[in-house]
Amino acid sequence: MTDISLHRVSTAEAVADALVGLIVSGTLKAGEPLRESSLATKLGISRNSLREAIRLLERSRLVKYEIHRGAVVSTPTLKDLDDLYRTRRQLELAGVQQEPSEEQLRAITAAFELLSETSKKNAVEPIVAADLALHQAIVDLLDSERISSFYRQICKELVFYFTVLSYTDEEYVNPEESIISRHSGIYDAIIAGDRALAHTLLEAHIEENYARLREILTEREAAGA
């Protein structure tokens, strides 16, 4: 297991993020039980903090509880993907149809600039984080803290799929073509106030993303069978 330390970090959210990193990297594999004692020691945290983090991941469906096994890493399925993307589609497309305030436009611009700058590093994890931050900014256009908070939970699940896609298709190798070009049109349309075009481009982006992930999961399930 990768050596990760969380000294002086006490929030369940930070611990949950560390666990997401272990799951995405494959250090914690699908179906693997989360051993509280060994994980708490490895992360340098209390077992109570770990339990709170596991409960957060259970809400985001990355972890599930099984009888006699306790908390285990979930195994992604096509049904999970379908449900997740149905939710993502509804929230993001609703967000992009709103008229942004000046503050929201600044947040969208900052998120897009961060994605552009991060993509130059050709590293999967920060690119995925910046990508999701841009989509979070789009959902934030709904101006609802409850919805934004709900989407942040969804992002903990999306980070797994985004990372799988990036590694499988090697998007991080040439992010200008594979990532920036897909988002620049959406960003430009939002800034220009063309909500119809922004909706069309975002919908196409989500559908393309979803279709490719379905192919990848179908291939994985076939290989596993």
Image (cartoon, helix red, strand yellow):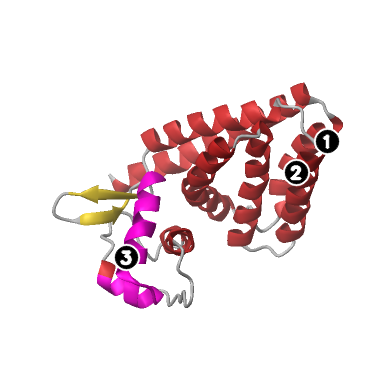
* x and y percentages locating residue 163 in the rendered image: 53, 53
Tag 2–tag 1 contact (CB < 8 Å): yes
**SS under mark 1:** helix
Task: Answer left or right for 142 relative to 17.
Answer: right
Q: Residue at x 47, y 62 (%)?
A: 21
**SS under mark 2:** helix
Within 10 Å of disc 2 (Cα), the crowding (few <14, some 14-19, many 20+) is many
- Give the residue pinned by disc 2: 108
For marks 1 and 3, give the CA distance. Answer: 45 Å
* x and y percentages locating residue 44 in the rendered image: 39, 77
Name the residue nearer the viewer: 43 or 224. Answer: 43
- Tell me the amino acid under the disc marked 1: Ile
Q: Which residues are magenta?
A: 37-60
Residue 51 painted magenta: yes
Task: Answer left or right for 110 relative to 1.
Answer: right
Q: Nearer the viewer, mark 2 or mark 3?
A: 3
For marks 2 and 1, give the CA distance. Answer: 8 Å
- Give the residue pinned by disc 3: 48
In the displayed structure, 85 sits above or below 164; it is above
> Is residue 93 among what the camera can see?
yes
- Tell me the amino acid under the disc marked 2: Ile
- Tell me the amino acid under the disc marked 3: Asn
> Is residue 184 among what the camera can see?
no
- Give the residue pinned by disc 1: 191
Name the residue nearer the viewer: 77 or 136. Answer: 136
For marks 2 and 3, give the CA distance. Answer: 37 Å
